[in-house]
Image (cartoon, rainbow, N blue to C red):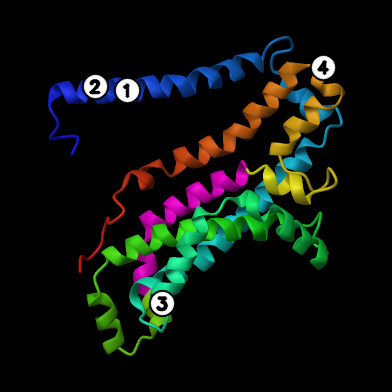
Amino acid sequence: MFKSASNKQKVITQTILVLISIMYIIPMVYVLISSFRGGGVSNYTYLFTSGFPIIRMIFNSVLVSVLQVTLIIAVSSPAAFSFSKIRFPGRDTIYLVLMLTMSISLLCFITPLFQTMKFLGWINTYAALVLPAATFWLPVAILILKNYYDSLGNELMEATKMEGGGYFTIWSKVYAPLSKPATVNVLVFAFINSWNDYLNPLLFSRTDEMRTLPMAVISLTSSIYGARPEIVFACLVIMAVPSIFIYLLFQNHLGEGMTSGAVKG
């Protein structure tokens, strides 16, 4: 579509994109520069040597993000394949209800979710940090993967059936490997969502041992560390690095078409 646009349309589009990029880049540059004011690199080392539990928070963020992404992909991929390729009673209704949950604000679930976690005794545990957030992101992951599976033809499924393969074999040996572009999209966006999640740790973590990195900023500003804004900015830079790294690491896969390598039906 962009290739067929006129030169004027291309210039206008690129100008808008540049302006939007500048709106995002300026605050990021400001935070980066501010993080070096006063002490320079020592602002970063101070976070790790002052007794502030940032290492524990980084560990918690990494663990929670990895567990969430693993759970989301492990559930959404076979679920999306089932909704796309397997006919069973109530399939379309179940899928519709699942998609409708995306229109409900997470804020509507805060009270019942907190009561449920409290009843189960999961407050201040990794289960409370992983399961609710992963569950809320599952419909998005299923939507992305189902759209990809829909674009794949049924020829390979029929061929595998003729060779005696069941649905699990068809999914795991044929369609799951072909869905790499869509799976990478789910992985990247689920990781970024989990890494930057603030609401769930705020609700379910009670001690520094269970808090994640997004809560470090609040902990810094509400303590004696808040007297040094450059320390807070340094923490923000550290928090942004993993998301940027993950995006850059998989950007080539993200750039591939969602139907890359697909067999059209």
In front of the other: label 3 or label 1?
3
- Of labels 2 and 4, earlier in sequence is 2
Mark 2, secondary structure of its residue: helix
Question: Tag 1: residue type?
Answer: Ile
In front of the other: label 4 or label 1?
1
- Of labels 4 and 3, earlier in sequence is 3
Question: Tag 4: residue type?
Answer: Ala
Classified by dominant secondary structure, the portion drawn in magenta counts as helix
According to the picture, the residue beneath numbered tag 2 turns out to be 12
Mark 4, secondary structure of its residue: helix
Residue contact at pointers 2 and 4, CB within 8 angstroms: no
Cα gap from disc 4 to disc 3, whole angstroms:
57 Å
At horizontal 84% and vertical 47% (from top left) the residue drawn is 206
- What residue range appears in magenta? 172-196
Q: How crowded is mark 1: few (under 14 residues within 10 Å), some or many (20 or more)?
A: few
**As drawn, is 123 to the left or to the right of 35?**
right
Question: Tag 3: residue type?
Answer: Arg
Instruction: Indicate the position of residue 108 as horizontal and vertical percent values.
Output: 64, 53
At horizontal 27% and vertical 63% (from top left) the residue drawn is 151
In the rendered image, residue 180 lying in the magenta stretch gets the answer yes
Classify 127 as above or below 203: below
Cα gap from disc 3 to disc 1, whole angstroms:
42 Å
Q: How crowded is mark 3: few (under 14 residues within 10 Å), some or many (20 or more)?
A: few
According to the picture, the residue beneath numbered tag 4 turns out to be 227
- Of labels 2 and 3, earlier in sequence is 2
Residue contact at pointers 3 and 1, CB within 8 angstroms: no
91 or 223: nearer the viewer: 91
Cα gap from disc 2 to disc 3, whole angstroms:
44 Å
According to the picture, the residue beneath numbered tag 3 turns out to be 91
Question: Tag 2: residue type?
Answer: Ile
According to the picture, the residue beneath numbered tag 1 turns out to be 16
